[in-house]
Image (cartoon, grey):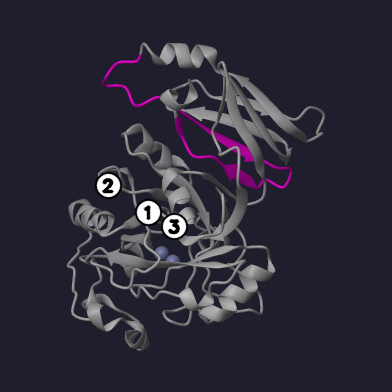
Amino acid sequence: MTKHLLPEKGNYYKANLHVHTTISDGSLTPEEIKEEYKNRGYSVVAYTDHEAMVPHKDLDDDEFLAITAVELATNAELTHGAYSYRETCHMNLYAKDPNKTVCAVYSKSRLWPAHAEQYIADEMKEIDFKRTFTPESMNEVIAAANADGFLVSYNHPVWSLNHYPFYSKLKGVWGVEVYNTGCVRSGYPDTVQPLDDLLTLGENVFPLATDDAHGKKDTFWDYFGGWTMIKADKLDYVTIMTALENGDFYSSTGPEIHDLYIEDGILTVKTSPAVSVEVATERRHNRCVRSKDGVPHTEAVFDLKSYIADSEHKLKTDPPAYIRVTVTDAQGNKAYSRAYYVSELQ
Ligand SMILES: [Zn+2]
Ligand SMILES: [Zn+2]
């Protein structure tokens, strides 16, 4: 029996899940963001202004959807040394409800810049959810945000100077940025390590490629570098958010994943022209199909029968068994599938 790991039916909708506008420290207005992304084939933008959750339903049309979101930043106390040593933790919250106007973890004492206050809903103005830079405090934010109907992403761990002792304690995160255009182009490329670390710790986190765009139109230096391809029946708020929550998407900086399915332990990956397709797992059982003689290929097939069979012998203390797929094109751009547990492969 064929099991489709990305939905067999539906359309792909291109999304940028991280952007800043003039509401916080971005350079473009929400309307300009819509125009620029829509002109480049995007159907979805999540507006993640710093600390200020501002719905943009007025921007929705038949071909564009604005996701209500916010980015929360929590800096470590500066106790010694230079400012640039300061760790921080940034998380995006994505509202599952299209009518969401109040964020239960809003912190009025953390709102910046000052001009953002004019955009804050009256019902939210007195909320001051306390948070500090500790995994315990971050987990309180994540739990409260999840209970309030948000998906939570863990942003740019490398730029944030985060390491395993901090992020390994996070619970309830939905997505982890493996690519952030602004960070990459300013010299802080993320890696898949935090994603795999959290997966092996039992957190079902999805890989995200985003822009985190702030810049001006003259260069668009931090725009259009990383995106998410969401497969869904229609461009409707709840349908799109449900697809995101379920992991019906892949993230990319270039390549396309056209199909991803498994039949009796044989995994097939159909893509745009690629020079390599890798299957990573939680243990030392990775596989890679490379193009021969420099000619890109568009299909890679992996026999995962022994991986699946061996997974039955793993100890209870071993990490959950999963695979995830990475596609690389001739320019070095990558597409990332989410992780699929062995139970989804049989
Ligand atoms: Zn950030
Ligand atoms: Zn940001």
Q: Amino acid at mark 1?
A: Tyr
> Residue at (60%, 33%) from the top-left corner?
260
**Mark in the foreground, 1 or 3:** 3
Residue 317 among magenta residues: yes
Residue tagged 3? 238
Residue 275 spot, x, y in % from top left? 72, 36
Mark 1 and mark 3: Cα distance apart in space: 22 Å
Looking at the rendering, the stretch of residues picked out in magenta corresponds to: 314-340
Relative to residue 156, is residue 34 drawn left or right? right
The circle drawn on residue 154 is: 1
Q: Amino acid at mark 2?
A: Leu
Q: Residues within 10 Å of mark 1 (few under 14, many from 20)?
A: many
Is the residue under label 2 in contact with that under label 1 (CB below 8 Å)? yes
The answer to whether 339 is drawn above or below residue 228 in the figure is: above
Q: Residues within 10 Å of mark 3 (few under 14, many from 20)?
A: some
Question: Is 275 or 8 nearer to us in this picture?
Answer: 8
> Residue at (54%, 33%) from the top-left corner?
5
Mark 3 and mark 2: Cα distance apart in space: 26 Å
The circle drawn on residue 62 is: none
> Residue at (18%, 73%) from the top-left corner?
128
Question: Is 287 or 31 nearer to us in this picture?
Answer: 31
Sequence-wise first label, 1 or 3: 1
> Residue at (23%, 67%) from the top-left corner?
104
